[in-house]
Image (cartoon, rainbow, N blue to C red):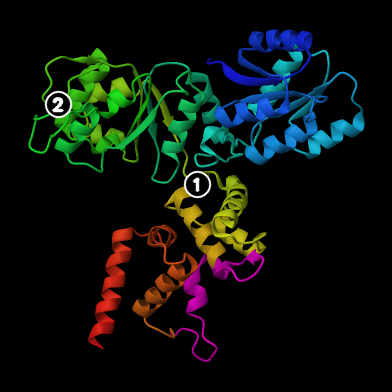
Amino acid sequence: MSRKKALLVENNANDQANMSKILVESRHHVTTAGDGMSALQEIIRDHYDLVIIELNLPHMNGLDLLRRIKELNKSLPVIITSANAGVREAVEAMKLGASDFLVKPLTLKMIEIITSRISNDLTETDKGRSNGRFTIITKNREMNRLLQKAREIAGSRASVFIQGESGTGKELFARYIHRYSDRRDKSFVAINCAALPETLLESELFGHEKGSFTGALVRKKGKFEIANHGTLLLDEISEMDYHLQSKLLRVLQEREIDRVGGIVPIPVDFRIIATTNKDIEKQLKDGKFREDLYYRLNVIPFHLPPLRERRDDIPLLANYFIEKYNRVDKRAVKGLTQEAMTSLIQMSWKGNVREFENIIERAILMSEGELVDKDDLFMTEKNTRTENACYPFMPVVSLKEMEKNIIFRTLDHTNDNRTHAAKILGISVRTLRNKLDEYRKKMETQ
């Protein structure tokens, strides 16, 4: 199992030495700081799995430091320690978000119990260096079992194969493994195998020499070289051309690559994580994916559950995305009505967490009150209502006109940011651009 990184903030030399020894024995890499400002600089500069703070620090006491840390990273576990603090300080520390308050002297057993409890907390919120961008939020038993397994295997070099439907968070899960590995300080490089044709994908993966083909004006490093000593994510690998699969297999076996047009093999050290949303067994049976490559990749398999199998996470995810898009979109939504929450829990969620996030963001933009209601979640219901109850099934406008209204309303809310608007609407920027061109041409002809 890989060692986790702990930051020990302690100004007493003897206590610092003793506690550092205990943390090392409990399988932690230890960095020390003697005051609050040094600790904050460390947290900004690097990733830590745990922070232990002496309450009575010079210049900035432990509670003030705890408050500042939680402003930077709310999910980072922090333990406050003291030799003579009372109940009042302990209560205040817990209110500010401390994971625990321990009385000195600390023992190995105390640290092991606390870190084990933190590690197995029902709600896994790991923001790390990503500032929340790559967060996994769950209290689901199966997801937490998978996250525990991910932490256990993170330190190995073995290939990982992640299967799951689109939107279940396969790339997030891959980054989670990287963040807990010994390679965490090296590159995490991702490439979508479905996004590029075979010739371009080969050059992107292995690089090319100057002049190796038309347009190769300079030597270019491939993703394998860029990910040297780090982690390479091959996203949607089942879309990779069969011919290129054989070249990838050789790289996995030999741990060296040949640039396109190159002569001398280049040794590389990497950890491969592959993902797919396809039925890989069917791909193998149909001869679309090499069995020998599959067995090379599938050393450590994971299968992420769809959102409909982890409905207990829906209230947690809803609160998380409401907080997130309140900040992004400068809104002040406080939550959802009971009817809205019930609707979310009952939905099938074919697009999984990605679809869920888009609906929450759109609802926040469309909501006119403090609480998101069902009509905010499903705009078509709200927009097709008519004040004339005698004709409940007759739309006020055509579907085309309704679509146009929704698009322009979303653009208005995003201050004409097309990329943001397209994401909320669940369409590509290209589709949005085509729709706007269509509306413009129609207006010109009228």
Q: Please say whether residue 305 is one of the residues in the magenta stretch.
A: no
Looking at the image, is 253 positioned above or below residue 389?
A: above
Q: Position of residue 120 (x, y in %)?
A: 64, 28
Q: Is residue 142 visible?
A: no
Quadrant showing the C terminus: bottom left
Task: Give the distance between the C-alpha atoms of the residues marked 1 and 2, in whole angstroms.
Answer: 45 Å
Identify the residue at horizontal 40%, vertical 16% (top origin): 157
- Of all residues shown, which one is farthest toward the front? 59
Circle 1: element type: helix
Q: Position of residue 396 (x, y in %)?
A: 44, 86
Identify the residue at horizontal 24%, vertical 30% (top origin): 205
Q: Amino acid at mark 1?
A: Leu
Circle 2: element type: loop
As rendered, which of 206 and 289 lies closer to the eye? 206
- Quickly name the residue at label 2: 209
- Label placed on residue 307: 1
